[in-house]
Amino acid sequence: MWCDPAFAPVADAFRQTGGGEGGAALAVHAGGRMVVDLWQGTADPDGVRPWERDTVVNVFSVSKGVLATLAHLYVQRGLLDLDAPVARYWPGFATATTIADLLAHRSGLPAVRRELPPGSLFDWDAMTAALAAESPWWTPGERHGYHAVTFGWLVGEVLRRVGGRRLRDLVRDELGVPDLWIGLPASEAGRAAYLAPPEAGPDATPSPLTGAMSEPGSVTMTAFCNPAEQLTPGLANTARWRAAEIPASNGHATARALATLYGRLVSCRRRAAGRAGALLGPDVLGRAVAPRSEGRDEVLLAQTRFALGYMLPCEIRPFAPNPCAFGHSGSGGALAFADPDAGVALAYTPSRLVVSAAGPDPRWKPMVAALYACL
């Protein structure tokens, strides 16, 4: 473990998040290097196996930021046009929408209306075919709504067609960040942390979102409940889930890997792409992280903000004090973001899940506050 003395308050805040079942890791990248790389707790359901340096954990929707980064890498190479219709890359795709709309949750395809058969969650071809044929829930480009699970197949299929290989291979080879996967290889399964059953956060009172989740046929319920398999208790601890390619929600990583990825994006504001590990040039990154969707979310029924694939700090996920920060949170409390103005990136990967529908994970605030106090 390592913590630069200048960031000792961040380490103190992280240690205070301990307690309860499970463990976690925290990493911070600043000034072109890792300044915090810490972990604590246990990684198995019995609380015996300690969390190690190489323990990985399912980070759920943090995976979306990984896909977004790969998409913008292809934009930089001239292989992907953000303003092009999806059908240019995906023949037979029925909805008249753009690549930018897919990334910004504006395509109107957050859910499939017809009930999907058992096994669909794990069947890439079945999900992409269903989405290619689906009618949009709203006119693409006019409104936005969180594509909680479909984002992965929509953006992932475009990337697969552009890159010519399975998404899991593209993430591994194109991004080149160790310990970052969409679909955990069987050889690494022993490193995965057990996810403790979710516990309610401080905002557990009923909300418009929880009400819509129980309304049959609503876009909210359909987005989160079809395929129905994603509601299976303990699903994320199964070998089948870990090995699958469900790119909006089954990415596995260490905090170090995610901080490295976002740290390389932060450096893009100061260096040309290709130098000193920078992934993207400043112009590409600037367009990628500019606000694209702001206001009422048709799925989450709250005020949200998204760039092109990245979440921005918003009413329900105020993960950073700077509105220019970008990244993504994940169900249960995982978080990875970069602040290009401050030149820092932070990643937090817990295995003790906290359900917080209408606000930030309570564990974030002291760590993020301590980080900004150190800058």
Image (cartoon, grey):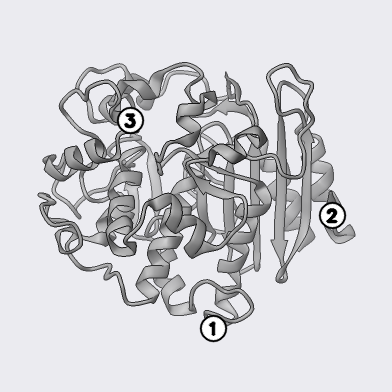
Regarding residue 310, the answer to whether it shows in the image is no
User: Between disc 1 and disc 3, whose residue precedes?
Assistant: 3
Circles 1, 3 touching at the beta carbon (< 8 Å): no
Q: Is residue 228 left or right of residue 218?
A: right
Q: Residue 226: horizontal and vertical position, in percent?
A: 28, 26
Q: What amino acid is labelled 2 in the image?
A: Cys
Secondary structure under tag 1 reads loop
Residue 94: x percent and y percent?
10, 49
- Label for residue 3? 2
Q: Quadrant of residue 269?
A: bottom right
Say whether disc 1 or disc 2 marks the residue closer to the N-terminus: 2
- Spatial separation of the CA atoms under disc 1 and disc 3: 40 Å
Give percent across and percent down for residue 93: 13, 51
Q: CA distance from mark 3 to mark 2?
A: 40 Å
Q: Which label lies toward us, 3 or 2? A: 3
Q: CA distance from mark 1 to mark 2?
A: 28 Å
Residue 272, numbered circle: 1
The residue at 25%/18% (across/down) is 215
Image position, residue 159 (x, y; %): 33, 58
Count neighbours of disc 2 (C-alpha within 10 A) and say few if under 14, some if 14 to 19, many if 20 or more.
some
Badge 3 amino acid: Leu
Query: Is label 2 in a helix, a strand or a loop?
Result: strand
- Which residue: 23% across, 30% down? 219
34 lies above or below 144 = below
Query: Which labelled disc corresponds to residue 121?
Result: 3
Residue in front for this viewpoint, 225 or 338? 225
The answer to whether residue 344 is visible is yes
